[in-house]
């Protein structure tokens, strides 16, 4: 039976170097990159914006606003399996455009329906878009690129996303300072940005490779040959739960530790967060490219061990006080940032690569569910543990993450088309050169030469002889 299009594309050896042209091609010729940047800008605007809008304009208490945001998050998680099945039916670009349109509709509902009703409607639509959007993005990227190029494209998208989050947070700060009028215009502009992103995504041309499947298998059917890899993916999703806590370390854990326990200035928390954003923008793509020559599950496990080491570092740094202790926490956060970059750069790429083509949407949806459940549990777990002691947070989190990393390196699926080196290694080249020099020496002796004639050897063989080979 001839191989499918997907397996052939994935197994192909990678180029020796990822050029800007290849990266743009993997981003849909730049149109998808533009859509992702506008979407990330809107996400950066929404994080600080929604809660302030509820309190200052919609007239809702902070507690009810937080409850509405949580309800929207849970509704989004409930929709994730449906989004995965939709992808398996061929809706990749359509799903992405739909989630962006839902986010825009939520902001319009916020403007057109004043009071709690509009805010709850906005939170639900935003929750669906935020949870189903990554599934559509992963499905689109799986069609736009193959092999280790997917890692690079996903890393580039995350760098764009962090740049958009930073810029969006700054714009939101300016709009909030301008009062109710500025906040309303900000909502209008963000909705327009989401609609522009949806239009850009709709124009991206997809090869349709992700829907390729075995000729004898119906769409979405689970074959016996797929069950082992599906079991491995399920174990990987379970092991991923403690990894998902890492996203709330900067936003929840470190601010609480720095301000309430170490009595450091609140500016330290903001500075560490900004440094993390800048580091991701600058380092994410080079690190992912550097690690792309290694098996993805090994990189995944390495990220867990690095994160676990950083959690232990936070525990030790937290014993200090004031600016000295905060400086130690900032230094440890560099190690944490590296672990987060490795984790986010390889997790989704491994899921896409290992998933059976006809089940890719559902597999990505389960991965998104494991991320969503972990992130939903993280704030409550972190604050409850810190209310006891710092060790109650960092020690179990480090142990759980290290255990998850060990499970992943042992049981996660292997890369179906792990890129091999395009040429011989340095040792292979050195050994081959030694053999060629020895063969040259034997040939010259047979022809009557008794010493290393540099000119003859360079002219006939293009080699520089090794004098020791003549002894």
Image: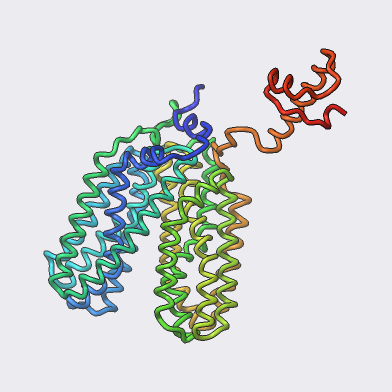
**Which quarter shows the C terminus?**
top right
Q: Against 375, is 62 above or below?
A: below
Percent across and percent down for residue 304 are 57, 60
Identity of the residue drawn at 28% across and 43% down? 31
| Residue 369 relative to residue 421: left or right | left
Identity of the residue drawn at 46% across and 51% down? 285
**Res 16 seen here:** yes
**Res 232 seen here:** no
Instruction: Tell me the quarter of the picture where residue 463 sits.
Output: top right
Q: Nearer the viewer, residue 178 or 459?
A: 459
| Residue 316 relative to residue 323: left or right | right
Q: Against 413, is 304 above or below?
A: below
Q: Nearer the viewer, residue 236 or 326?
A: 326
Percent across and percent down for residue 422 are 57, 33
Percent across and percent down for residue 421 are 59, 36
Q: Against 432, is 165 above or below?
A: below
| Residue 405 relative to residue 118: left or right | right
- Asked which colour scheme the image uses, the reply is rainbow
């Amino acid at each position: 039976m001839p191989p499918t299009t997907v397996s052939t594309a994935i197994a192909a050896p990678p180029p020796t170097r990822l050029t800007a042209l290849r990266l743009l091609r993997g981003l849909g010729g730049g149109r998808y990159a533009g859509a992702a940047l506008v979407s990330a800008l809107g996400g950066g605007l929404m994080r600080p914006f929604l809660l302030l809008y509820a309190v200052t304009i919609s007239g809702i208490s902070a507690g009810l606003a937080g409850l509405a945001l949580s309800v929207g998050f849970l509704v989004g998680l409930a929709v994730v399996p449906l989004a995965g099945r939709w992808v398996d039916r061929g809706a990749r670009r359509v799903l992405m455009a739909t989630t962006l349109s839902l986010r825009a509709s939520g902001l319009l509902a916020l403007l057109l329906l004043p009071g709690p009703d509009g805010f709850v409607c906005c939170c639900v639509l935003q929750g669906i878009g935020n949870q189903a959007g990554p599934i559509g993005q992963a499905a689109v990227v799986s069609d736009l690129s193959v092999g280790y190029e997917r890692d690079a494209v996903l890393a580039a998208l995350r760098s764009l996303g962090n740049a958009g989050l930073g810029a969006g947070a700054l714009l939101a700060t300016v709009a909030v300072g301008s009062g109710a009028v500025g906040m309303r215009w900000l909502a209008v502009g963000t909705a327009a940005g989401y609609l522009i992103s949806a239009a850009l995504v709709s124009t991206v041309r997809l090869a349709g490779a992700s829907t390729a499947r075995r000729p004898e298998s119906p769409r979405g059917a689970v074959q016996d040959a797929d069950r082992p890899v599906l079991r491995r993916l399920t174990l990987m999703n379970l092991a991923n739960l403690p990894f998902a806590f890492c996203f709330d370390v900067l936003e929840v854990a470190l601010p609480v530790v720095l301000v309430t326990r170490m009595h450091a200035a609140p500016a330290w928390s903001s500075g560490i967060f900004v440094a993390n954003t800048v580091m991701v923008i600058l380092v994410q793509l080079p690190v992912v490219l550097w690690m792309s020559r290694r098996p993805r599950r090994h990189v995944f496990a390495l990220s867990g061990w690095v994160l676990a080491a950083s959690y232990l570092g936070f525990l030790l740094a937290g014993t200090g006080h004031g600016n000295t202790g905060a400086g130690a926490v900032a230094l440890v956060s560099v190690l944490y940032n590296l672990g987060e970059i490795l984790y986010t750069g390889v997790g989704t790429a491994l899921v896409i690569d290992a998933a059976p083509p006809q089940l890719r949407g559902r597999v990505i949806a389960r991965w998104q569910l494991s991320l969503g459940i972990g992130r939903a549990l993280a704030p409550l777990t972190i604050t409850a543990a810190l209310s006891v002691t710092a060790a109650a947070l960092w020690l179990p989190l480090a142990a759980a993450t290290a255990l998850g990393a060990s499970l992943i390196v042992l049981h996660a699926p292997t890369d179906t088309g792990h890129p091999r080196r395009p040429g011989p290694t340095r040792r292979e080249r050195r050994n081959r050169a030694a053999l060629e020099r020895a063969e040259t020496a034997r040939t010259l002796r047979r022809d009557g030469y008794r010493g290393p004639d540099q000119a003859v050897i360079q002219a006939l063989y293009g080699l520089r002889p090794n004098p020791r080979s003549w002894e």
